[in-house]
């Protein structure tokens, strides 16, 4: 997403519920985890989720990666407004290229609505092996592909009825590009993550893959 208008739309309040949902899922699946070291966010977008996590975990740094300069610019502006530049750091990079990060591996790795943007979904799952420490906590949340175009449109109408046309259009395209739950299960098997990550329905149209890496 390299368009500045698009990046600004994803920074607005229309997606507040989606961003808060991710934070709530993190607290639900890792109720006793209080990160105090560093979190890696793959596909961070405008850093709406890192900002929310940073407010919860004040002693934890969050390293945000995205391939879009426009998204990172939006994130940096938001972080500067809240004076959190020391806690939230930004890095432009595109998987599967080697990411230039302050550390090689992380104790917590997260990703929200990034998987369906990848031409090869294994890029994300394989990256977990590369960037996670042993026993790292992992939370991946993404859309699920509906069984028909009509059902996809109904989801857009139901969950974003008054949303901006740009976001409604993007949601529809993203639903079509997403994977089914069976496809995600097969991806986890292929990546040797099926025994580590549990799959759950986060919403009627989203899944969550979560757990600890061995």
Image: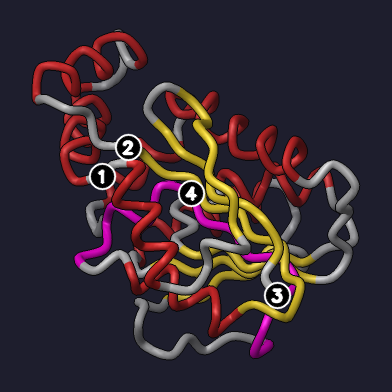
Q: Please tell me which of labels 2 and 3 falls first in the chain.
A: 2
The reply, left or right, for residue 107 in relation to residue 205 is right
- Judging by the rendered image, the residue that carries numbered circle 3 is 214
Check disc 2 and report the residue beneath it.
Answer: 144
CA distance for labels 2 and 4: 13 Å
Task: For label 4, count other residues whose C-alpha is less than 10 Å away and answer few (under 14), some (14-19) or many (20+).
Answer: many
Q: Residue at x 44, y 77 (%)?
A: 126
Instruction: Give the total number of marks visible in the rendering.
Output: 4
Q: Nearer the viewer, mark 1 or mark 3?
A: 3
Q: Circle 4 sits in a helix, a strand or a loop, which is it?
A: strand
Of the numbered discs 1 and 3, the one sitting upstream in the chain is 1
Q: Nearer the viewer, residue 177 or 47?
A: 177
Which sits in the foreground, 129 or 41? 129
Q: Farthest residue toward the left? A: 149
What is the secondary structure assignment of the residue under circle 3? loop
User: Which of pointers 1 and 4 indicates the residue nearer the eye?
Assistant: 1
Q: Nearer the viewer, mark 2 or mark 3?
A: 3
Location of residue 89 by image quarter: bottom right
x then y, percent, for residue 150: 10, 17
> Based on the displayed image, in which of its 4 quarters is residue 167 positioned?
top left
For the N terminus, the image quarter is bottom left
Q: Residues within 10 Å of mark 2 (few under 14, many from 20)?
A: many
Check residue 178 in the rendering and tell me which mark sits there, or answer none: 1
Do the residues bearing badges 1 and 2 touch, measured as CB atoms within 8 Å? yes
Q: Element under label 2?
A: loop
Above or below, comparing residue 35 to residue 205 in the picture: below
Residue 112: numbered disc? 4
Locate the C terminus by quadrant.
bottom right
Which one is nearer the viewer's eye here, 31 or 8? 31
Within the magenta stretch, is there residue 129? Answer: no
The magenta segment is: 103-119
Where does the image place residue 79, in percent across and percent down from the top left? 64, 53
């Amino acid at each position: 997403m390299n368009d500045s208008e698009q990046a600004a739309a994803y920074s607005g309040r229309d997606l507040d519920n989606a961003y808060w949902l991710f934070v709530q899922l993190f607290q639900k699946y890792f109720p006793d985890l209080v990160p105090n070291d560093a979190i890696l966010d793959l596909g961070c977008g405008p850093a709406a989720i890192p900002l929310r996590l940073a407010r919860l975990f004040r002693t934890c740094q969050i390293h945000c990666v995205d391939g879009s300069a426009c998204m990172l610019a939006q994130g940096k502006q938001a972080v500067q407004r809240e004076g959190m530049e020391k806690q939230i750091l930004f890095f432009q990079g595109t998987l599967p290229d080697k990411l230039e990060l302050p550390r090689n591996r992380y104790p917590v790795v997260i990703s929200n609505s990034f998987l369906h943007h990848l031409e090869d979904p294994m890029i994300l799952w394989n990256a977990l092996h590369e960037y996670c420490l042993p026993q790292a906590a992992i939370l991946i949340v993404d859309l699920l592909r509906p069984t028909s175009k009509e059902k996809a449109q109904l989801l857009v109408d139901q969950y974003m009825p008054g949303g901006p046309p740009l976001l409604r259009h993007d949601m529809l395209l993203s639903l079509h590009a997403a994977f089914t739950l069976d496809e995600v299960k097969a991806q986890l098997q292929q990546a040797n993550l099926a025994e580590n990550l549990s799959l759950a329905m986060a919403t009627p149209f989203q899944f969550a893959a979560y757990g600890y890496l061995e």
